[in-house]
Image (spheres, rainbow, N blue to C red):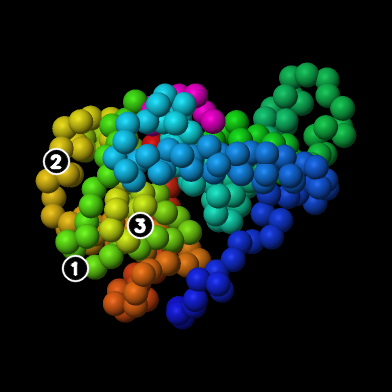
Amino acid sequence: MRRVYASQIGFEEDLYTAADTTSEERVEIETKFFQSVDSAAATALSKIIQRLDLEADELRAWVIYVRSLMHRTPEDLKVFKETAHDHIRMSTKMLARNVRIQPALIDRTKFQDELLILKTLPRVILNARILELLTSCHWVVIDVSDAKHKLLVSDNPVIRTNGLLIEMGHIGLPLSPTLLCIGAPKIATIEVISKLSGSWLVKQTNSQIVQGARHFIAASDDTQFEFIKKHFSSGKRYPVLKPEL
Protein backbone atom coordinates (compact mmCIF):
# COMPACT_ATOMS: atom_id res chain seq x y z
CA MET A 1 0.00 0.00 0.00
CA ARG A 2 1.50 3.34 -1.03
CA ARG A 3 0.38 6.86 -1.82
CA VAL A 4 0.29 7.88 -5.46
CA TYR A 5 -0.87 10.97 -7.30
CA ALA A 6 -3.92 10.96 -9.52
CA SER A 7 -1.69 11.08 -12.61
CA GLN A 8 -0.20 7.72 -11.60
CA ILE A 9 -3.56 5.93 -11.68
CA GLY A 10 -4.22 4.38 -15.07
CA PHE A 11 -6.37 1.87 -16.86
CA GLU A 12 -5.38 -1.61 -17.93
CA GLU A 13 -4.66 -1.74 -21.64
CA ASP A 14 -6.56 -4.15 -23.88
CA LEU A 15 -8.97 -5.00 -21.07
CA TYR A 16 -11.79 -5.76 -23.51
CA THR A 17 -9.80 -7.86 -25.94
CA ALA A 18 -9.32 -11.55 -26.64
CA ALA A 19 -6.36 -13.13 -28.38
CA ASP A 20 -7.89 -12.63 -31.83
CA THR A 21 -9.86 -9.46 -31.19
CA THR A 22 -9.59 -7.09 -34.14
CA SER A 23 -9.21 -3.35 -33.70
CA GLU A 24 -12.78 -2.91 -34.96
CA GLU A 25 -14.14 -5.34 -32.36
CA ARG A 26 -12.16 -3.63 -29.60
CA VAL A 27 -13.53 -0.25 -30.63
CA GLU A 28 -17.04 -1.69 -30.66
CA ILE A 29 -16.82 -2.63 -26.96
CA GLU A 30 -14.62 0.15 -25.60
CA THR A 31 -15.84 3.08 -27.65
CA LYS A 32 -19.19 2.28 -29.18
CA PHE A 33 -20.54 0.78 -25.97
CA PHE A 34 -18.76 2.02 -22.84
CA GLN A 35 -18.02 5.49 -24.18
CA SER A 36 -21.63 5.88 -25.26
CA VAL A 37 -22.76 4.72 -21.80
CA ASP A 38 -20.53 7.32 -20.13
CA SER A 39 -21.55 10.11 -22.49
CA ALA A 40 -25.26 9.38 -22.10
CA ALA A 41 -24.92 9.44 -18.30
CA ALA A 42 -23.10 12.79 -18.20
CA THR A 43 -26.25 14.90 -18.46
CA ALA A 44 -28.04 12.72 -15.93
CA LEU A 45 -25.16 13.05 -13.46
CA SER A 46 -25.16 16.83 -13.80
CA LYS A 47 -28.91 16.99 -13.08
CA ILE A 48 -28.63 14.51 -10.20
CA ILE A 49 -25.98 16.67 -8.51
CA GLN A 50 -28.26 19.70 -8.97
CA ARG A 51 -31.20 17.72 -7.50
CA LEU A 52 -33.17 18.11 -10.71
CA ASP A 53 -35.72 15.56 -11.89
CA LEU A 54 -34.55 13.24 -14.64
CA GLU A 55 -36.42 12.57 -17.86
CA ALA A 56 -37.14 8.91 -18.59
CA ASP A 57 -34.24 8.58 -21.04
CA GLU A 58 -31.87 10.29 -18.60
CA LEU A 59 -32.87 7.95 -15.79
CA ARG A 60 -32.29 4.96 -18.05
CA ALA A 61 -28.87 6.33 -19.01
CA TRP A 62 -28.01 6.74 -15.32
CA VAL A 63 -28.97 3.22 -14.26
CA ILE A 64 -27.13 1.71 -17.25
CA TYR A 65 -24.04 3.63 -16.15
CA VAL A 66 -24.36 2.43 -12.55
CA ARG A 67 -24.91 -1.12 -13.78
CA SER A 68 -21.85 -0.91 -16.05
CA LEU A 69 -19.63 0.08 -13.13
CA MET A 70 -20.15 -3.40 -11.68
CA HIS A 71 -18.45 -4.98 -14.72
CA ARG A 72 -15.58 -2.68 -15.55
CA THR A 73 -12.70 -3.64 -13.27
CA PRO A 74 -10.11 -6.20 -14.40
CA GLU A 75 -11.21 -8.58 -11.62
CA ASP A 76 -14.89 -8.30 -12.50
CA LEU A 77 -14.15 -8.97 -16.15
CA LYS A 78 -11.83 -11.88 -15.31
CA VAL A 79 -14.50 -13.57 -13.19
CA PHE A 80 -17.10 -12.84 -15.86
CA LYS A 81 -14.93 -14.45 -18.53
CA GLU A 82 -14.06 -17.50 -16.43
CA THR A 83 -17.63 -18.14 -15.31
CA ALA A 84 -19.09 -17.63 -18.77
CA HIS A 85 -16.37 -19.79 -20.31
CA ASP A 86 -17.30 -22.63 -17.94
CA HIS A 87 -20.96 -22.25 -18.90
CA ILE A 88 -20.13 -22.39 -22.60
CA ARG A 89 -17.97 -25.48 -22.29
CA MET A 90 -20.53 -27.26 -20.13
CA SER A 91 -23.39 -26.40 -22.49
CA THR A 92 -21.40 -27.54 -25.52
CA LYS A 93 -20.56 -30.89 -23.92
CA MET A 94 -24.18 -31.44 -22.88
CA LEU A 95 -25.32 -30.64 -26.41
CA ALA A 96 -22.77 -33.06 -27.86
CA ARG A 97 -24.26 -35.92 -25.86
CA ASN A 98 -27.66 -35.48 -27.47
CA VAL A 99 -27.02 -34.01 -30.91
CA ARG A 100 -24.60 -34.94 -33.68
CA ILE A 101 -22.10 -32.12 -33.42
CA GLN A 102 -18.84 -31.34 -35.15
CA PRO A 103 -15.75 -32.04 -33.00
CA ALA A 104 -14.40 -28.64 -33.97
CA LEU A 105 -17.20 -26.98 -32.04
CA ILE A 106 -16.42 -28.98 -28.91
CA ASP A 107 -12.74 -28.15 -29.23
CA ARG A 108 -13.26 -24.41 -29.41
CA THR A 109 -10.23 -22.56 -28.13
CA LYS A 110 -10.46 -20.40 -25.07
CA PHE A 111 -9.79 -17.19 -27.02
CA GLN A 112 -12.72 -17.99 -29.33
CA ASP A 113 -14.96 -18.32 -26.30
CA GLU A 114 -13.54 -15.09 -24.83
CA LEU A 115 -14.38 -13.20 -27.99
CA LEU A 116 -17.96 -14.46 -27.81
CA ILE A 117 -18.11 -13.60 -24.11
CA LEU A 118 -16.80 -10.07 -24.68
CA LYS A 119 -19.46 -9.48 -27.31
CA THR A 120 -22.04 -10.71 -24.79
CA LEU A 121 -20.96 -8.30 -22.04
CA PRO A 122 -23.04 -5.32 -23.26
CA ARG A 123 -26.16 -7.51 -23.33
CA VAL A 124 -25.46 -8.65 -19.77
CA ILE A 125 -25.14 -5.04 -18.61
CA LEU A 126 -28.36 -4.17 -20.45
CA ASN A 127 -30.29 -7.02 -18.81
CA ALA A 128 -33.90 -5.82 -19.04
CA ARG A 129 -35.05 -7.19 -15.69
CA ILE A 130 -32.20 -5.63 -13.73
CA LEU A 131 -32.49 -2.29 -15.53
CA GLU A 132 -36.23 -2.28 -14.82
CA LEU A 133 -35.50 -2.82 -11.13
CA LEU A 134 -32.92 -0.03 -11.03
CA THR A 135 -35.16 2.32 -12.99
CA SER A 136 -38.01 1.73 -10.54
CA CYS A 137 -35.79 2.72 -7.61
CA HIS A 138 -36.10 6.01 -5.79
CA TRP A 139 -32.87 7.99 -6.11
CA VAL A 140 -31.59 10.72 -3.82
CA VAL A 141 -28.38 12.69 -3.34
CA ILE A 142 -27.31 13.19 0.26
CA ASP A 143 -24.94 15.99 1.27
CA VAL A 144 -22.46 14.69 3.86
CA SER A 145 -20.25 17.79 4.00
CA ASP A 146 -20.80 18.00 7.77
CA ALA A 147 -19.04 14.66 8.31
CA LYS A 148 -15.61 14.43 9.92
CA HIS A 149 -14.14 12.65 6.89
CA LYS A 150 -14.70 12.83 3.15
CA LEU A 151 -16.12 10.10 0.95
CA LEU A 152 -13.66 7.81 -0.79
CA VAL A 153 -13.92 6.17 -4.20
CA SER A 154 -12.17 3.13 -5.63
CA ASP A 155 -11.92 0.88 -8.65
CA ASN A 156 -15.06 -0.81 -7.27
CA PRO A 157 -17.17 2.30 -6.56
CA VAL A 158 -20.70 0.90 -6.25
CA ILE A 159 -21.81 -0.05 -2.74
CA ARG A 160 -24.79 -2.33 -2.25
CA THR A 161 -26.60 -4.59 0.13
CA ASN A 162 -26.76 -8.30 -0.64
CA GLY A 163 -29.79 -7.81 -2.87
CA LEU A 164 -32.01 -4.81 -3.58
CA LEU A 165 -35.22 -6.61 -2.70
CA ILE A 166 -34.24 -7.44 0.88
CA GLU A 167 -35.36 -5.31 3.82
CA MET A 168 -33.60 -1.92 3.56
CA GLY A 169 -32.03 -3.01 0.28
CA HIS A 170 -30.23 -0.18 -1.50
CA ILE A 171 -27.39 0.73 -3.82
CA GLY A 172 -25.06 3.71 -3.56
CA LEU A 173 -22.33 5.62 -5.35
CA PRO A 174 -20.16 8.48 -4.06
CA LEU A 175 -20.42 11.37 -6.52
CA SER A 176 -17.85 13.60 -4.84
CA PRO A 177 -16.06 13.84 -1.47
CA THR A 178 -19.28 15.27 0.01
CA LEU A 179 -22.14 13.87 -2.10
CA LEU A 180 -23.56 10.36 -1.87
CA CYS A 181 -26.15 9.04 -4.33
CA ILE A 182 -28.49 6.35 -2.98
CA GLY A 183 -31.09 4.29 -4.83
CA ALA A 184 -33.66 1.97 -3.25
CA PRO A 185 -36.89 0.25 -4.35
CA LYS A 186 -38.75 1.53 -1.29
CA ILE A 187 -39.14 5.22 -0.48
CA ALA A 188 -39.18 4.27 3.21
CA THR A 189 -35.60 3.05 2.87
CA ILE A 190 -34.56 6.37 1.34
CA GLU A 191 -36.27 8.24 4.17
CA VAL A 192 -34.47 6.21 6.84
CA ILE A 193 -31.06 6.62 5.18
CA SER A 194 -31.60 10.34 4.62
CA LYS A 195 -32.11 10.86 8.36
CA LEU A 196 -28.77 9.28 9.29
CA SER A 197 -25.89 11.55 10.22
CA GLY A 198 -23.34 12.46 7.59
CA SER A 199 -20.52 11.03 9.69
CA TRP A 200 -22.29 7.67 10.03
CA LEU A 201 -23.01 7.49 6.29
CA VAL A 202 -19.42 8.36 5.39
CA LYS A 203 -18.07 5.79 7.84
CA GLN A 204 -20.27 2.98 6.49
CA THR A 205 -19.77 3.95 2.84
CA ASN A 206 -16.00 4.26 3.14
CA SER A 207 -15.83 0.93 4.93
CA GLN A 208 -17.50 -0.80 1.96
CA ILE A 209 -15.47 1.17 -0.56
CA VAL A 210 -12.14 0.31 1.06
CA GLN A 211 -12.95 -3.34 1.70
CA GLY A 212 -14.28 -3.81 -1.82
CA ALA A 213 -11.37 -2.11 -3.59
CA ARG A 214 -8.82 -4.20 -5.46
CA HIS A 215 -6.35 -1.75 -7.00
CA PHE A 216 -6.74 1.75 -5.65
CA ILE A 217 -8.55 4.18 -3.38
CA ALA A 218 -8.96 7.82 -4.38
CA ALA A 219 -9.17 10.37 -1.57
CA SER A 220 -9.27 14.15 -1.36
CA ASP A 221 -6.75 14.08 1.52
CA ASP A 222 -4.60 11.59 3.45
CA THR A 223 -6.42 11.68 6.80
CA GLN A 224 -7.79 8.17 6.28
CA PHE A 225 -4.58 6.58 5.04
CA GLU A 226 -4.10 4.27 8.05
CA PHE A 227 -7.73 3.11 7.83
CA ILE A 228 -7.29 2.39 4.13
CA LYS A 229 -4.03 0.52 4.70
CA LYS A 230 -5.61 -1.65 7.40
CA HIS A 231 -8.81 -2.62 5.56
CA PHE A 232 -7.88 -2.40 1.88
CA SER A 233 -9.39 -5.20 -0.23
CA SER A 234 -10.51 -7.21 2.80
CA GLY A 235 -14.20 -7.50 1.99
CA LYS A 236 -16.59 -9.69 0.08
CA ARG A 237 -16.96 -9.49 -3.68
CA TYR A 238 -20.41 -10.03 -5.16
CA PRO A 239 -20.62 -12.50 -8.08
CA VAL A 240 -20.80 -10.53 -11.32
CA LEU A 241 -23.16 -13.06 -12.90
CA LYS A 242 -25.56 -13.08 -9.97
CA PRO A 243 -28.94 -12.20 -11.51
CA GLU A 244 -30.21 -10.17 -8.60
CA LEU A 245 -28.72 -7.04 -7.15
Q: Position of residue 8 (x, y in %)?
A: 56, 74
Q: Amino acid at mark 3?
A: Ser
Kindly identify which residue carries mark 2: 192
Q: Amino acid at mark 1?
A: Lys
Considering depth in this image, is 96 or 87 the residue closer to the camera? 87
The quadrant of the rendering that contains the N terminus is bottom left
Segment colored magenta:
126-135
Mark identifier at residue 176: 3
172 vs 134: above or below:
below
Please name which of the two marks, 1 or 2, marks the residue nearer to the observer.
Answer: 1
Q: CA distance from mark 2 to mark 3?
A: 22 Å
Q: CA distance from mark 3 to mark 1?
A: 15 Å
Kindly identify which residue carries mark 1: 148
The structure residue drawn at horizontal position 48% and vertical position 43%, both measured from the top left corner, is: 42
The structure residue drawn at horizontal position 59% and vertical position 66%, both measured from the top left corner, is: 10
132 vs 236: above or below:
above
Magenta-drawn stretch, dominant element (helix, strand or loop): helix
Q: Residues within 10 Å of mark 2 (few under 14, many from 20)?
A: few
SS label for mark 3: strand
Q: Is residue 162 visible?
A: no
Question: Residue 15 occupies which quadrant of the picture?
Answer: bottom right
Indicate left or right for 9 with 49 as reference: right
The structure residue drawn at horizontal position 37% and vertical position 31%, both measured from the top left corner, is: 54
